[in-house]
Image: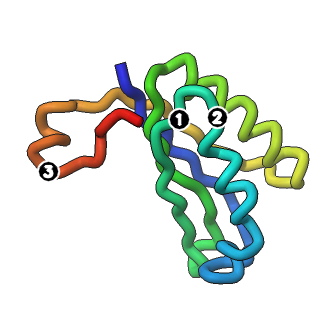
Amino acid sequence: MQKLLQVDFGFNGPFGDEMATMLTDLAKSINNEPGMIWKIWTESESKQLGGGVYLFEDETSAQAYLEMHTARLNEMGITDVRGLILDINQTLSKLNHAPLAQK
């Protein structure tokens, strides 16, 4: 069953185009993570937050990614990582055009 992973953490930049340029290789590598279907990158310069919303094939994949990603962020000095793995109400989400298609 698909799982949604929501992650956010304190982040002081860069944001926008500069972030996209700096993290393109990382973004490409995320496509190779087991069970990952898609990611939406999130950012808020005014709130000094970075993060993302991910769709995974299953809870095992989402949990493994959250653990790896948290460790990677910790190595970068980011220690306030918040991650939630959530169920998806497929019926209502499809009604509202959610991008839930498989890879």
Compared across the picture, whether 85 is left or right of 97 comes to right
Label at residue 33: 2
Residue lying at the far left in this picture: please name it: 95
Check disc 3 and report the residue beneath it.
Answer: 96
Label at residue 36: 1
Residue occupying the point 15% across, 41% down: 94
Residue type indicated by callout 1? Met
Which badge, 3 or 2, comes first in the chain's sequence? 2
Point out residue 19 in the picture as x, y percentages from the top left corner.
Answer: 69, 74
Residue type indicated by callout 3? Asn
Point out residue 2 in the picture as x, y percentages from the top left corner.
Answer: 37, 26
Q: CA distance from mark 3 to mark 2?
A: 27 Å
Whether pointer 1 and pointer 3 mark residues with C-beta atoms closer than 8 Å, the reply is: no
Image quadrant assignment for residue 95: top left
Q: CA distance from mark 1 to mark 3?
A: 22 Å
Foreground mark, 1 or 3, reads: 1
